[in-house]
Amino acid sequence: MSKETIQSLAEAEYKHGWVSNVDADQLPPGLSEDIVRAISAKKNEPEWLTEWRLKAYRHWLTMTEPEWQKPKYPKIDYQGIIYYSAPKKKPTVTSLNEVDPELLETFEKLGISLDEQKRLTGVAVDAVFDSVSVKTTFREELSKQGIIFCSFSEAVTDHPEIVRKHLGSVVPFTDNYFAALNSAVFSDGSFCYIPPGVRCPMELSTYFRINSAGTGQFERTLLIADEGAYVSYLEGCTAPQRDENQLHAAVVELVALKGAHIKYSTVQNWYPGDKDGKGGVFNFVTKRGLAHENAKVSWTQVETGSAITWKYPSCILRGDNSVGEFYSVAMTRDRQMADTGTKMIHIGRNTRSTIISKGISAGHGDQTYRGQVKILKGATGARNFSACDSLLLGDKCGAHTFPYIESQNSTAVIEHEASTSKISDEQVFFLRQRGLSEEDAVSMIVNGFCKDVLSELPMEFAVEAQKLLGLKLEGAVG
Amino acid sequence: MTKLLEIKDLHVSIGGTEIIHGIDLSIGAGEVHAIMGTNGSGKSTLTKAIAGHPDYEITRGDILLKGKSILADEPEDRARAGIFLAFQYPVEIPGVSNMYFLRAALNAQRKARGEAEVSGADFLALIKEKAKLMDIDAGLLNRSVNEGFSGGEKKRNEILQLAVLEPTLAVLDETDSGLDIDALKTVANGVNSLRDSKRSFLLVTHYQRLLNHIKPDFVHVLLDGRLVKSGGPELALELEEKGYAWLEQTV
Ligand SMILES: Nc1ncnc2c1ncn2[C@@H]1O[C@H](COP(=O)(O)OP(=O)(O)OP(=O)(O)O)[C@@H](O)[C@H]1O
Ligand SMILES: [Mg+2]
């Protein structure tokens, strides 16, 4: 490929880098028990939740920041972060007319017109701006079937018993450093409950956006599919272009009860920093799903943004015959780094898991796939299949694969495949000879490489993800 | 009248080694030219130079399309200007459906010419018709481009692309190699159906047999990077009979 194309691709700009002028209600920066209490108070939380946060905070104080990951980053100043920031005009929005127009414009720019989205695609949307959920669409329709889809804060107020039962049941605050931090300071997120036997009639989706300077985003998502229920859920993320790094430390907990199926998709496009690696979001997220008997948890992620992505959406296959799936596309360019993968913990009998990971590196992008497959003693008849493919664009990028396989049951069948390839000049030339521009040619090859993952996304988002990959490749080809 | 394609004193190098040592060739509108020659003589190199492969450096000479030099044009610009190359070794593009790829290619070309893009439904009708012409199984259309195709299927797929894209200059690099007898006839019929007074062909082949089906106006012999002899269809018959040795001596 030509040097110029590589150059131009490397200089393509982030398209969601603008800042909205929305009045924010903020707490001062810094972290202390008082701040934790203040967050809880701002949200009128019940005593038990305030206590839970404080326990998490105290536990966090005893922990040290992990350092085993491949991407290294400058020390985070936890006292410099604003832990609570909410758009001021928020209070109890009942119709879109009451939402701050500036905010609506923000979502329009993101390509999410809440109203349109509502009418045209039949997708229910929850929008989280900085730390607070601003609008959930379609709620009434969903509630007719007993489906609860609302912001996390509302769930705490309206359905405390469900929240209390499941909060921290999949990702306890003791789990890891960032999960503990999140548990102490999380300000909002999405909540969803699907009653037994109900198939959620539409895609549920949350759009996250970090707007204010100096804020971190610590949202929490809790999704519960009761026995035999089905839900497909999608989250999308963007952030403005800022010179400083912003921390995003979310926690997502999925509970799939007996025979339930949760499909969780992510299209992550946080600001990646500039081409020299200045600024960008640190995306340190803990995502885990618990599958009971005959249940299924499927993770699909398209990770194109963030300066550093560090996450392993995982499945705990506790029930017999439960199924875990992980489909991932991660793309890094310029100075972006990703250390991602999954964990599949087989506990029940005849549990099955599939891991398909596609990594694309361009420019100086660097990627690590880390996948753990753990078969416990009781997991008789467990099976896992993993395939990790890396595609390199240019010769300054890197890809590393670390499969960790641990089996305590001799009946388990584990298959692992890995490949690393380069995009071939002959493929690009072939497509250009047919009339496609060099960028379109590369984009087509990359999309083809990711097909097995993209095809797992809900239709409308697959198209979005394809476009996003195309945009991301602009100027990234070498 | 200006020729469709004019190649003037063309010298081509790959990685600093000169492969083509000065070729002159003119192709008029509607003409069919065949190029024959020994393995490694530079036939594919010539076709890739025409198509603008970035690894092939033109160190001297010129290539003109309708009187205008195309040397500065990118491969996609040449394609959009009507140059099509059927590859000797078509590459595979895993995960990209043949149909999707062809529609994207057609629309990229149409857009460049200021024409409207073809809708999904219209394209489906078009491709069905062309696939039938080339006797291509519908299953191949939905599979990834060339992935796991047999040698002959790949070649037929190239001609399907030719039929859909309808270029003004079609360069076919050994499209007949690896085809069974029936497939050869199908491909030849396909090519013949595309022949008209405006569309020209440059056929690279090792076998006179193809030329029984697609009658060329001119036959050229390429040896060691030079065109050593040109003539009518009878030259191909002569080569079939005598081989290349007698020509090598004339160099
Ligand atoms: N990338 C390359 N680097 C170096 N030499 C090359 C390269 N590509 C082709 N060549 C050489 O150029 C010469 C011409 O090759 P070309 O493929 O044009 O031959 P051809 O006439 O098409 O042969 P065939 O009939 O076998 O297809 C050969 O000697 C070949 O080895
Ligand atoms: Mg050849």
Image (tube, coloured by chain):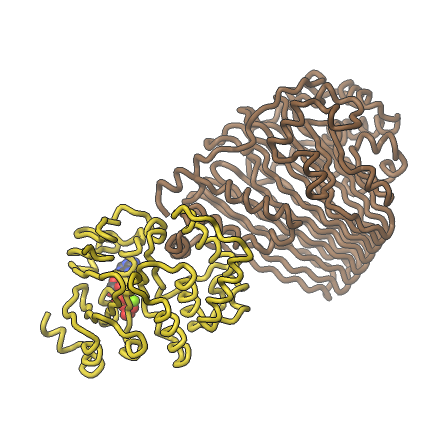
Chain colours: A brown, B yellow
Which of A381/A223 is in front? Answer: A223
Q: Position of residue B157 (x, y in %)?
A: 44, 67
Q: Position of residue B59 (x, y in %)?
A: 19, 51
Q: Give the left or right position of residue A130, taking residue B91 as reference.
A: right
As drawn, the residue found furthest toward the bottom would be B241
**Which image quarter: residue B91?**
bottom left
User: Which residue is painted at 31% across and 76% down in the image?
Assistant: B210
Which of A31/B179 is in front? Answer: B179
The quadrant of the picture occupied by the C terminus of chain A is top left
**Which image quarter: residue B181?**
bottom left
Q: Is residue B62 above or below residue A385?
A: above
Q: Is residue A103 above or below residue B221?
A: above
User: Which residue is painted at 38% across and 60% down in the image?
Assistant: B166
**Which image quarter: residue B42?**
bottom left
Question: Where does ligand 2 appear, by image quarter?
Answer: bottom left
Q: Is residue A69 above or below residue A456?
A: above
Can residue A426 be seen at all in this image of the molecule?
yes
Which of A450/A397 is in front? Answer: A450
User: Which residue is painted at 16% across and 72% down in the image?
Assistant: B231
As drawn, the residue found furthest toward the right would be A161
Q: Give the left or right position of residue A294, taking residue A475 as reference.
A: right
Q: Position of residue A108 (x, y in %)?
A: 63, 31
Q: Position of residue A97 (x, y in %)?
A: 73, 25
Q: Give the left or right position of residue A438, taking residue A404 as reference.
A: left
As drawn, the residue found furthest toward the top would be A28
Q: Give the left or right position of residue A424, taking residue B10 as reference.
A: right
Can residue A422 be seen at all in this image of the molecule?
no
Q: Is residue B241 above or below residue A453?
A: below
